[in-house]
């Protein structure tokens, strides 16, 4: 049985609420930058204990960043044995958080706490929830990463100092690691924050080789273990692979490259995405055009922060309004660009719009009626019998066919729900002789 003492400032905190679980499905190509980071200098605060301070993990991450051409400003509070709840009541931790201007805050729980159910649910989870609130209060732009630790080398039962609350008897490293992985993933999902899967990378390496990542106490990391941890945290911060980085922390190039490969495979090729892109905004918009005026509806989204917007209307004019309208001086085709950003990350989308001139024209000499117009979801067409069997086609303002079908009844309904807002043309017959303008609102 392992009974390692820890500092405590509270034992019982009731979890007051559980945030809705949000998942992001992503496709990642290893070795490519798949998210736009708007700066090459970031500031990171590490909050943990000896698992973070051993071999000066923050400095290792800083040195890796330097070798990647990035600048990482670091600070930390890492007293031995500290819990997340200890940090929540620690003047030094709170002072460093309140300094503000942190881009990232890394949270590392005491190594046994997540494996003991009583403390996982009554101490770790509530404390991380409260720390997240404090961090966001002073650092509106800060992103939070949980630093998943690793199991003891030979497993064993983990207990509090009194022996009152204990974990299961872990038969080996893998058994304990599975418990830690579950705990860190659960709280990361609950709080919609990232997870740096250090322990899982350790697991892949230890199951693949006879290498040793633990120090002599079979708990803390040796320099290899800390280097592996630094690789995972580097990628979690910068969203970049580590393969080919020249900083090795004194390890042989061959060994460092092996660790880099394992870390990259864990983070970028895993079935679990570790919430890696949870802070990445998604830019999107649609437009409605009336005459020479375009009205833009912004549908960009971000899970963890408020977005800022930068519009380029393609004629030399710009805007930072969320849902702008813009009147163009002349007819023509314009490329509209929207950049949605949230301090660190940004996403860009461009759409081409047509102002004033259309390749489609309305022909009012028709023998059918349709309604309503403007419409939101559908239109109803009433036709004379001689038009039964005719093909109808919906075109956009450039003349591109959007959807089509055959008129089989004198009264037919066309579903427009999935079309963007804008001006369209409804044509019946093959030669466009019966064409009317349809406005989708």
Image (cartoon, grey):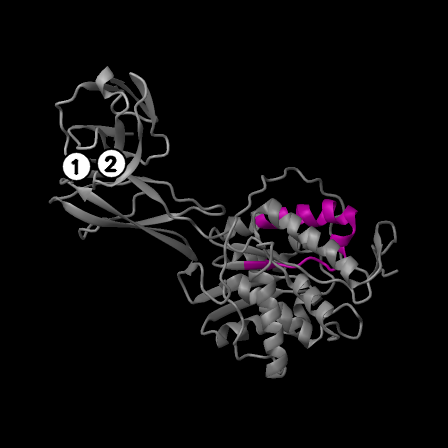
Residues at circles 2 and 1 in contact by the CB criterion of under 8 Å: yes
Q: Is residue 151 above or below residue 309?
A: below
| Cα distance in 3D space between marks 2 and 1 | 8 Å
Looking at the rendered structure, the secondary structure element under dot 1 is loop
Badge 2 or badge 1: first in the primary sequence: 1
Decide whether residue 304 is among the magenta residues. no
Does residue 4 lie above or below 128 as drawn?
below
Closer-to-camera residue (291/148): 291
Residue of label 2? 395
Question: Label 1 neighbourhood size at 10 Å, few (<14), some (14-19), many (20+)?
Answer: many
Tag of residue 360: 1
Image position, residue 315 (x, y; %): 17, 51
In-image side of 234 versus 52 (left or right): left
- Residue 347 x/y as whole percent: 38, 53
Q: Which of 336 and 5 is in front in this view?
A: 336
State the SS at label 2: strand
Range of residues picked out in magenta: 105-132
Left or right side of 225 for 192: left
**Residue sitting at x 43%, y 50%:** 281
Residue 267 relative to residue 14: left or right: left
SS assignment for the magenta stretch, majority? helix
**What residue lies at 17% left-to-right and 32% top-to-bottom?**
432
Q: Position of residue 213 (x, y in %)?
A: 72, 72
Foreground of the two, 172 or 333: 333
């Amino acid at each position: 049985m392992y009974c390692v003492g820890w500092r405590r400032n509270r034992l019982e905190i009731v979890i007051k609420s559980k945030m809705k679980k949000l998942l992001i499905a992503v496709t990642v190509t290893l070795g490519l930058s798949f998210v736009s980071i708007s700066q090459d200098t970031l500031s990171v605060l590490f909050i943990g204990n000896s698992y973070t301070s051993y071999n000066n993990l923050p400095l290792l991450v800083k040195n890796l960043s330097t070798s990647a051409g990035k600048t990482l400003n670091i600070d930390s509070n890492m007293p031995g044995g500290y819990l997340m709840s200890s940090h929540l009541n620690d003047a030094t931790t709170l002072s460093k958080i309140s300094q503000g201007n942190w881009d990232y805050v890394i949270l590392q729980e005491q190594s046994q706490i997540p494996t003991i159910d009583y403390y996982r649910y009554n101490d770790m989870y509530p404390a991380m929830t409260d720390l997240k609130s404090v961090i966001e209060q002073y650092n509106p732009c800060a992103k939070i990463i949980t630093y998943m630790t690793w199991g003891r080398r030979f497993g064993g039962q983990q207990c509090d100092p009194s022996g009152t609350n204990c974990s299961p008897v872990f038969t080996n490293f893998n058994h304990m690691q599975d418990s830690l992985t579950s705990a860190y993933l659960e709280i990361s999902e609950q709080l919609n924050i990232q997870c740096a899967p250090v322990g899982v990378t350790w697991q892949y390496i230890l199951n693949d080789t006879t290498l040793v990542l633990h120090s002599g106490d079979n708990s803390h990391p040796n320099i290899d273990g800390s280097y592996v941890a630094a690789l995972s945290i580097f990628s979690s911060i910068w969203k970049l692979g580590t393969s080919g980085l020249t900083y090795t922390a004194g390890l042989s190039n061959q060994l460092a490259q092996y660790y880099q490969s394992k870390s990259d495979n864990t983070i970028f090729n895993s079935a679990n995405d570790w919430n890696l892109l949870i802070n990445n905004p998604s830019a999107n918009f649609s437009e409605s055009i009336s005459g020479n005026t375009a009205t833009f509806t912004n549908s960009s989204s971000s899970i963890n922060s408020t977005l800022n917007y930068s519009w380029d209307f393609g004629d030399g004019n710009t805007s930072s309004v969320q849902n702008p309208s813009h009147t163009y001086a002349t007819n023509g085709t314009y490329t509209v660009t929207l950049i949605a950003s949230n301090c660190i990350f940004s996403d860009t989308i461009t759409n081409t719009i047509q102002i004033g001139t259309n390749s489609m024209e309305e022909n009012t000499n028709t023998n059918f009626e349709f309604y309503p117009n403007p419409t939101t979801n559908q239109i109803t067409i009433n036709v004379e019998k001689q038009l039964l069997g005719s093909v109808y086609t919906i075109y956009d303002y450039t003349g591109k066919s959007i959807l089509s079908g055959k008129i089989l009844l004198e009264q037919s309904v066309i579903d427009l729900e999935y079309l963007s807002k804008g001006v369209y043309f409804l044509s019946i017959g093959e030669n466009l002789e019966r064409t009317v303008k349809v406005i989708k609102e």
